[in-house]
Image (cartoon, rainbow, N blue to C red):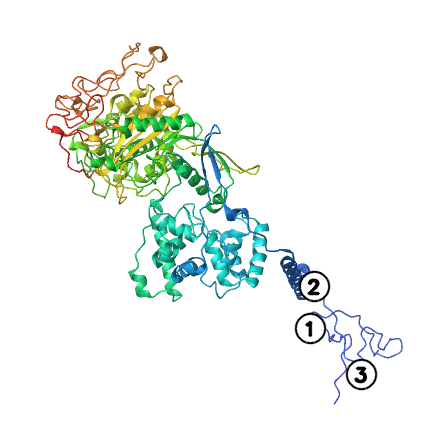
Amino acid sequence: MSDPSPPPGWTPRDPDTPPGEPRARQPQEPPGRQPGQAGTPAGPGRPDAPPEPGKPGKKARRRRTGRRRFLPTWRMLAGGVLLAVLLLGGALVAGYLLVDIPPANAAATAQSNVYLYSDGSLIARDGEVNRVNVPLSQIPRTVQEAVLAAEDRDFYSERAVDPKAMLRAAWNTATGKGTQSGSTITQQYVKNYYLGQEQTIKRKAKEFFIAIKLGREKSKDYILEGYLNTSYFGRNAYGIQAASQAYYGKDTDRLTTAEGAYLATLLNSPSAFDVVSHPQSRPRAVARWNYVLDGMVKKDWMPAAERAATRFPEPGKVRTAAGLSGQRGYLVEAVKDYIVERKVLDDKTLAEGGYRITTTIDRRRQNAFVEAVDDEMVSKLEPAKRKADRLVRAGGVSIDPATGKVVALYGGIDYTRQYVNNATRHDYQVASTFKPFVFAAAVENGSRTQDGRRITPQTIYNGDNKRRVVGTRIPYAPENEGQVSYGNITVNTATDLSVNTVFAQMVVDVGTDAVKKTAVALGIPEDTPNFDSGPAMALGTMQASVLDMTQAYATLADHGRHTPHTFLEEITKGGDTLRLPDRNPAQAVSREAADTTTSMLISVVDNGTGTAALAAGHPAAGKTGTGELDRSAWFAAYTPDLVTVVSMMGQDPDTGTLQSLYGALGEPRIGGGGYPARIWAAYTKTALEGTDPLDFELDLQPGAVQPPPSPLLPPSESDTPPRTPGGRTPTPPQRPSRPTPPTPTTGGQDQGGRTDGGQTDNGRTDGGTTDGGQSQGGQTQGGQTNGGQTDGGTSAGDQGGTTAGTQGTDGGATEGQRPPPSAFLE
């Protein structure tokens, strides 16, 4: 049976129209008319004619509509990929044919860098080539494997370049996971020997093609030998033989596996991982050393039992070139560290040499610093007579607060004899020099005591010895220096006398996190060792460097404006000038907070533990500090136009361990108000020679009292009311007479200045200080015996003087006896 004919008006489905799509409307045929009848065209030419028998129907191409019109087709994508492959292949072939292996570059025989004072005169040259090439056969197999474990564990099985590693490194760098080279040892050798350290696409492309050619033309042993002989290991050592001598004093064929692993560690960061020059980097260096040894175990190059028994091999002392003797080596090292840490250049590029580096160091002030230390301390050392004198170290930094320029630095007695830079090291507690940061944070944050009183210089605190800190879950009851209880005293007097219990309570009142935030804003690095938030931080348990402390005090001196410090005026090479880091000043704390802190530090110099600084002949503000177990003594102070911090430190010259300074220089104890303050005064007097003394211009918080005119200025320069004997209470305005600057007595400022009646609520009683000098009661007759400091010096402690039979506030001792070690800070 045949299918019935479609009803009139029915449009046949186009076989090319997919199911589900609407049919195109066709004009209806007249009733009764069939295709092929008269008046109706039929045949192959008709659009709706059925296909001819035996001929398949032709599919109509669908048009792309909407957003799909803008998307490439699969044919376009395939064509694009094919074209890219052809272009890349052509570029690789062209690069391979056009790039030849060049001769060794100039960096393979490194040039000297020239370091200059700010006036253009020469400080030193460095970069003399220290390289002795050795054949691979003279390098122990385990040492070779240690280097491979550190840098390229698949060196012998991989190709000269590893595109996958390069892409991974580029991705990690772009996504902030750390800068990585992605280079094989072959590529690193090409960079070291044939090219340079500059980070450019052109240099990277050349490295790629030269490495491929070198990998085809040379053996793996040849490349590894070249790499080991050209790599920079720090200490001006190029190549593994020079490094072996520089760090362990032996030839490469005598290196142990542990020593080889440490040398391999240095390849990652030659300067930073030297645990002798940078003791603060020891944890990172040891972690990298462990990574190398663990890699050797994973590659079956070292038995696990031997790995477990391996101990870190301590490298030897730094042996410096004679051209870096005296202070020159310390200056060059500090400038190098600044350049590398601020990413002006990396240490390998800097080691290539050829740079002319003009520093901010003022030659006259630098010489003045050295002379001050020599005259006030070094000339008095007698290590043959007193064993404790062998332990004495000193460091200092001086900064112009308006510009942030480091104008002088004292790193130690001689770079060729004491190789660790005492100005930049981070392993001594800063002690009471931290206390001003606590008060600055109190003013900055509008802090109040536990009972709601605003903290100002006149706020009363309880200064009793071992008073339990209130408001913290951590039990803490610090000791005052000398175990002295002061009763109720003002913050100003507590600063003068460096009372521990007052500032331990204040740091809790302000909030330890707020205090840390303020200290960081002033210039203390957040990653400073032992910079932990807690009540003890008020006593200076953190281990900031002398440079860090100078930076922070420079912010206070410049009315709270923080200008990042710098060692650099200019760096040039071959007529090109390098871009230096941006140093935009910023208001770290309010002027009110900084200036009110300065007003109290002026009192420390005029009446407190820092009176030795008056010998500079310039108005000054400062703070003393004595570290735990007397391992360090600090004096941090400033005039309106110069900030200087001086520290004395105790260290065993043989073992490098930190030691107490008891008995050094013939003193029972060494305090910040003694030798450090005298060094500061001698240096500042010379550094500011020829300039007029400037008084401080201060904007104080409400409730604070302007300090009286400095006794070092003529009366006409200030109409500020003078200081009364009872404290800071101002009297009716009157022109004060110009008192004679007090000469520190044998015991310095004595706690005997308080009368038998104790401390009044307003500050000191009439038995305290006079108009800027020392009261008759300030020094007791028994204050210092024959065992103490002789004519005219301050005591070994910051206050130092003692009453008969009683230890002084900062540690002067009766009968000249050596006091027992204290476990607390001043």
Mark earlier in primary sequence (1, 2) = 1
Question: Which residue ends up furthest to the bottom in the rendered image?
Answer: 1
Residue 567 found in image quarter: top left
In space, the residues marked 3 and 1 are separated at their CA atoms by: 22 Å
Of the numbered discs in the image, which one, if any, rests on residue 18? 1
Residues packed near mark 2 inside 10 Å, few (<14), some (14 to 19) or many (20 plus): few
In space, the residues marked 2 and 3 are separated at their CA atoms by: 32 Å
Q: Residue 301 versus residue 720: which sits nearer the camera?
A: 301
Mark earlier in primary sequence (2, 3) = 3
Of the numbered discs in the image, which one, if any, rests on residue 53? 3
Q: Residue 275 versus residue 263: which sits nearer the camera?
A: 263
Count of numbered circles in the view: 3
- The spot of residue 581 in percent (x, y) is 49, 38
- The spot of residue 705 in percent (x, y) is 30, 20
Mark earlier in primary sequence (3, 1) = 1
Q: Which residue is mark 2?
A: 64
Residues packed near mark 1 inside 10 Å, few (<14), some (14 to 19) or many (20 plus): few
Quarter of the image for the N terminus: give it. Answer: bottom right
In space, the residues marked 1 and 2 are separated at their CA atoms by: 15 Å
Of the residues shown, which amino acid type is indicated by label 3?
A: Pro
Tell me if residue 756 comes above or below residue 150 in the rendering. Answer: above
Of the numbered discs in the image, which one, if any, rests on residue 650? none
Left or right of 133 on screen, residue 576: right
- The spot of residue 384 in percent (x, y) is 22, 35
Secondary structure of residue under mark 1 = loop
What residue sits 26% from the left and 45% below the top? 655
Secondary structure of residue under mark 2 = loop
Of the residues shown, which amino acid type is indicated by label 2?
A: Arg
